[in-house]
Image (spheres, grey):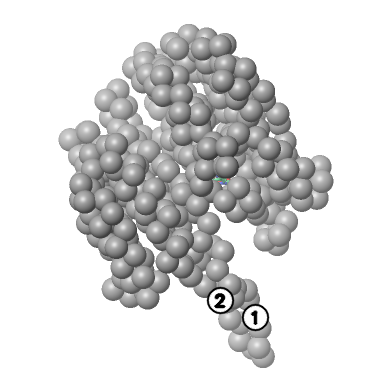
Amino acid sequence: MNLNILVLPGDGIGTEVTREAVRVLRHVAGKWNHALTVKEALLGGVAIHKTGNPFPPETERLAADADATLMGAVGLPEFDNAPPEKRPEKGLLGIRKALGVYANLRPVRAYPSQLDSSPLKNHLVEGTDMIIVRELTGGIYYGTPRGITESGAEVRAVNTMTYTRSEIERVARMAFRLAGARRKKVTSVDKSNVLENSQLWRRVVTEVAREFPDIALDHMLVDNCAMQLILNPRHFDILLTENMFGDILSDEGAVLAGSIGMLPSASIGDRKPSGAQVGLYEPVHGSAPDIAGQNKANPLGAIGSVAALLAYTFNLQKEASAVEGAIEAVLKSGKVTADLRPSGPPATTEQVGAAICDAI
Ligand code: NAD
């Protein structure tokens, strides 16, 4: 198979973890005889430095041409007070929108060997295995009108939470299809007791559920969901929610597994006319300026994103399972970075990447 991949290392530890992810991808391509082409482009703070734009047109062109895009992370402290248009995060929103990846999938799984690094008691977190499906290109992060206006002595800020029926339908269908290959359960999360936007969300998800009679659907309010994720994480198989709720809940989900550095994500949209699944794959974590450049970032989130890329965009299930199996084996071996609190000396980012290749 021909695998044409665009890599966007981004900022901070993004460059370090994607280096290891690409190493694993090359290893997989070599072992299973796939022709791999890897191109690199700019996104985020590094792109602002080099071009003045967090999402340069050249990056947009290369991403549209690639089969799949593998991203590191964006964000540099020097831009913390910059206007929205000149912030690295603008690049992130830009590429998601440009690729039309409207569903963000974040698997949250408690690996038996990592139970002790979860902040929850072992008996609560044991057996947790869910995918959080977050709507990614609508809702309050994109809605207009938005902005800050001043009138006399008063200042007013406005954001708009907006969804259409079709935006909800397509992400709901994706969630129900995923549930079909798992434990056949979708929990849809909203705030329908207060927000009209959520009332539409609940109505449309309930309608879409009728197309999938073998999947059980329940609804949960977002405040209760924040609590249930900690009290009873095994309740969830597919957790489906809108953009901002998903942003917040998926970070809560992230810590259940032990370290945010371990978590992969896949952002997917419709299929291209060729049948290929459009996909943007990235670890859940940010650019971690506090540990950048020290070869101690956990690359497993980025490497897990490679497994997702192989599975979703190329339907290479054997290869994806080999990467996932290697992650599990390396976790078990204890050759892990400092964030996972190994009993011996922590491994470096590079050593973990090499150990994954060996395990494959
Ligand atoms: P962060 O995820 O970068 O870091 C949070 C904490 O987790 C830090 O202590 C960090 O050292 C640790 N951590 C994160 N990833 C790790 C890894 N792979 N291995 C070991 N430890 C890891 O979040 P933050 O500090 O809130 O944000 C830093 C910057 O990243 C900001 O500019 C933010 O906007 C940006 N950000 C980008 C993305 C993205 O690109 N998708 C996501 C979140 C935050």
Is residue 138 rendered to the left or right of residue 50? left
- Asked if 71 appears above or below 349 in the picture, the reply is below
Q: Residue at x 52, y 73 (%)?
A: 160
- Relative depth, front residue between 227 and 341: 227
Q: Position of residue 177 (x, y in %)?
A: 34, 44
Quick one: quadrant of the C terminus?
top left
Quick one: quadrant of the N terminus?
top right
In primary-sequence order, the first of circles 1 and 2 is 1
Task: Count numbered badges in the picture.
Answer: 2
Q: Can residue 187 be seen from the camera position used here? A: no
Q: Position of residue 72 (x, y in %)?
A: 59, 36
Is residue 51 rendered to the left or right of residue 277? right
Q: Determine whether the residue tagged by mark 2 lies in a helix, strand or loop.
A: strand
Q: Amino acid at mark 2?
A: Val
- Relative depth, front residue between 192 and 98: 98
Q: Residue at x 37, y 54 (%)?
A: 172
Which residue was labeled with disc 1? 149
Which residue was labeled with disc 2? 158
